Amino acid sequence: MKYNVKLYRVAVSVIVLLTLMGHLEISHAQVSETNPYMGAPTEMVKAPNGAITNKKLLDRIGDFSWTEPTIENPVKGIWVFGGYGLAPMSIIETEKGLIAFDTGDTKHDGELMLEALRTVTDKPVKAIIYGHSHTVFGAGVLAEGNKDIMVIGHPELNNVVAENQGGGGAPSFYPEVGPYLTARVLTQFNAYMPSEGPDGYVVPTNLTTMDMAFLPVNTPVQDGQEMTVLGVKMQFFTKYGSDDKVHTTVWLPERKIVFTTLFWSAPPQLYSLRGDVFRDPREWIAGLRFTLDLKPEVLISAAARPIVGAKKIRENLESYMDGASFVLDQSLRGILAGLGPDDLRHFVKFPKYLDEAPPNLQSYGEISTYPPAIYYKTVGWYDNDAANLKPLAPADEASRLVPLMGGRTKVLEAAKAALEKKEFAWAAKLANQLYLIDKQDKDARQLKADALRQMAYVSTGANDRAHLMSQALALEGKVTIASLIPPPTEVIVATPAMFVNYFRVRIDPKKSGKTSKFIRFDFSDGTSAGLHIRRAVVEFVPEPGDYQLKPDITLALSGETWSKIYLSQAMPEDLIKNKDIKVTGDADEAARLINLFDRYNPEKAIVIPPAFIGHGH
């Protein structure tokens, strides 16, 4: 047998390199020394609202964020209204009227910003530009009844808003789980935290209302398109996205001003704790590079304070772009070294120069939560440690570990000792073992709450604090966190067939047994859909008239009646008895088939207005 010597040497070199990388280790002592969740020295202070927080956050948050409503006039003819909602609104003033860039996350945001706008000018808003699909819901307020107002945006923005508004909840890879992610949205945006006091939020990312005043895009723009708007020459770029896939950058070439949603007041959030579709760092980084190459002299962001001066913009964009590149590249480096998702949380840490760069303050999300998302997208869940291939259920594992640790009393003592040493993450982990065994264990609940609260205090990320503190308050019985938020009735009524599809995932295999039946739904709006129950699996049939089987049961009902079934607001047998549902076939069997599907708990379900569906950053 002949060998290719050159290829052999390359292969040996690769094996040696990978072997060396496989021996990469993280010093746990070093991790603890720099980890505020495990006793690293952290100076704590009180925010103006009384919230206990990390001094690092308060010292730097004003660099790119607003902690209270503020009007800025960075250059002539440009106004920025920050701190009135989750995201700012920018205004370009012209002789012919005003151009608004983004309009707020809610109708209420639009009302606050219009009121503030009227303190600087009485000119009407004659054009609106959407830089982002999340910040479109104050537009109707700013239009002040002008039905002919020009609304500029990405050509797919209307579709994205419609899909989110008409879906099952917050954006997700599988829309069927939207109600679960929507519930997590409420946690992210401070719905369960007080506005004042030690446990209050520090970064005001709360949504005060959930109403909307959306105006559809009537002037879609393509990537690179040039247009004069109210006498202002503009060029639009739609190629790159951030947490949103329908991002639009606006370039004013005559003044070298760029309007963007790619630059935030915190590092690019490559993963949202509420859960979301994957955010590809490469796309975000490419968009930042593109923005940098425009060589702007004024940068107006839909997510941060404005920056004036070419040198300052370049320095901040480079630091911001390098921060995102560092998280991606070091995550991939760690994967090559054999690190799993939990290892990566501690391996990927900003070096001092990036950590201290003004735009990289981790005030919204903390980068330790991003590498696992990159790992899962790159590799999947399996960390290549065969010991983790067939894990025990968490409660089962806890019931076996606690006796080995000396029993409940010993674990409680160890958790308390960890708290005293400020090893908050370890204290939470220990308390959680007891909590998993008995979720009503008062001592375990309080210890876990104490640990989570201290973790919330030392965190800098608004999202991290929200999840940590909200769960601490829930463990103490001070708030009740919704686990699911079903869609509103009007959303289901608008597209009942879509929610027939979503209903299929709620089949209970233990109840369905050997059932094999095809149900047809005929709605009063003229649409139809079907569900073919095949034992433990349900197939959605979008065109029941063309299906291979004839229906065993046909239900004639309105969208409103279907919403009552979907939201578990009424029992199917009662709706049939009251003739809200007309059954062709066996009425008792029809009720039995519908009852094979899981029900929401109507007493615990929180139903929210349709404006909130699909929201998130």
Image (cartoon, rainbow, N blue to C red):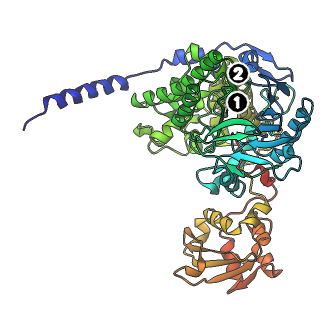
Q: Which three-letter amino acid code belongs to the residue tagged 1?
A: Ser
Vertical placement of residue 437 versus 581, above or below: above
Element under label 1? strand
User: Which disc, if any, is residue 301?
Assistant: 1
| Direction from residue 127 to residue 358 in the image, left or right | left
Q: For mark 2, what is the residue?
A: 307
Q: Residue at x 55, y 68 (%)?
A: 536
Point out the image quarter for the C terminus: top right
Q: Is residue 111 visible?
A: yes
Q: CA distance from mark 1 to mark 2?
A: 8 Å
Q: Residue at x 65, y 70 (%)?
A: 596
**Quarter of the image where one finds residue 550:** bottom right
- Give x and y (percent) for residue 276: 62, 44
Point out the image quarter for the N terminus: top left
- Give x and y (percent) for residue 504: 62, 66
**Quarter of the image where one finds residue 23:** top left
Q: Residue at x 76, y 47 (%)?
A: 150
Badges 1 and 2: C-beta atoms under 8 Å apart?
A: yes
